[in-house]
């Protein structure tokens, strides 16, 4: 379904790496979050399962990618020790990088409002 380019790292977390990938059939770029959960404790496994449930719930609610206000989930693949979360690839910087540019000053009000509205929208959808 998807090919993962492990030489093209998009981001890194404490337990995961995000790589550029492609849909094999269409060539469309995707982001693949690879989580090695082989050493996770029970609590970490439960948190991971919760994250996947939330992503699937959002994907089910917004089957049409163009109407989805969130990053679209394509697939979740589990090989027993590595979980691959395949989402749409979005150009540009992530929210941490964006906000980091304003570290010494306030984020512009219109951007702050937009971020806040997206967070409220997320909460509404999930409840």
Image (tube, helix red, strand yellow):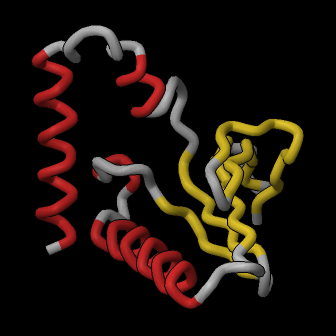
Number of marks drawn: 0
| 99 over 38 or under it: above or below | above
Give x and y (percent) for residue 117.
12, 41
Which quadrant of the structure image shows residue 32? bottom right
Residue 12 horizontal/vertical position (percent): 67, 45
Q: Extreme right residue here?
A: 7
Taking the spot 39% from the left edge, 67% from the top edge, the residue there is: 59
**Looking at the image, which is closer to me, 31 or 38?**
38
Residue furthest to the top: 105
Q: Is residue 63 above or below residue 100?
A: below
Q: Quadrant of the N terminus?
A: bottom right
Left or right: residue 77 versus residue 7 is left
Question: In terms of image quadrants, where is residue 51?
Answer: bottom left
Quadrant of the image for the C terminus?
bottom left
Q: Is 119 drawn above or below residue 111 in the view shown? A: below
Specify whether 82 is left or right of 65: right
From what the image shows, is residue 33 above or below residue 88? Answer: below
Taking the spot 34% from the left edge, 50% from the top edge, the residue there is 70
Looking at the picture, tell me which residue is in the foreground, 45 or 75: 45
Q: Residue 76: x, y in percent?
A: 61, 73
């Amino acid at each position: 379904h998807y090919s993962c380019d492990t030489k093209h790292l998009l981001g890194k977390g404490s337990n995961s790496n995000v790589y550029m990938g492609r849909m094999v059939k269409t060539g469309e770029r995707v982001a693949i979050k690879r989580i090695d959960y082989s050493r996770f404790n029970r609590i970490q496994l439960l948190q991971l399962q919760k994250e996947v449930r939330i992503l699937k719930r959002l994907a089910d609610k917004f089957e049409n990618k163009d109407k989805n206000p969130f990053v679209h989930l394509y697939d979740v693949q589990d090989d027993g020790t590595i979980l691959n979360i395949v989402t749409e690839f979005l150009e540009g910087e992530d929210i941490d990088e964006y906000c980091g540019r304003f570290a010494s000053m306030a984020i512009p009000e219109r951007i702050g409002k937009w971020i806040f509205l997206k967070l409220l929208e997320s909460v509404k959808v999930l409840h």
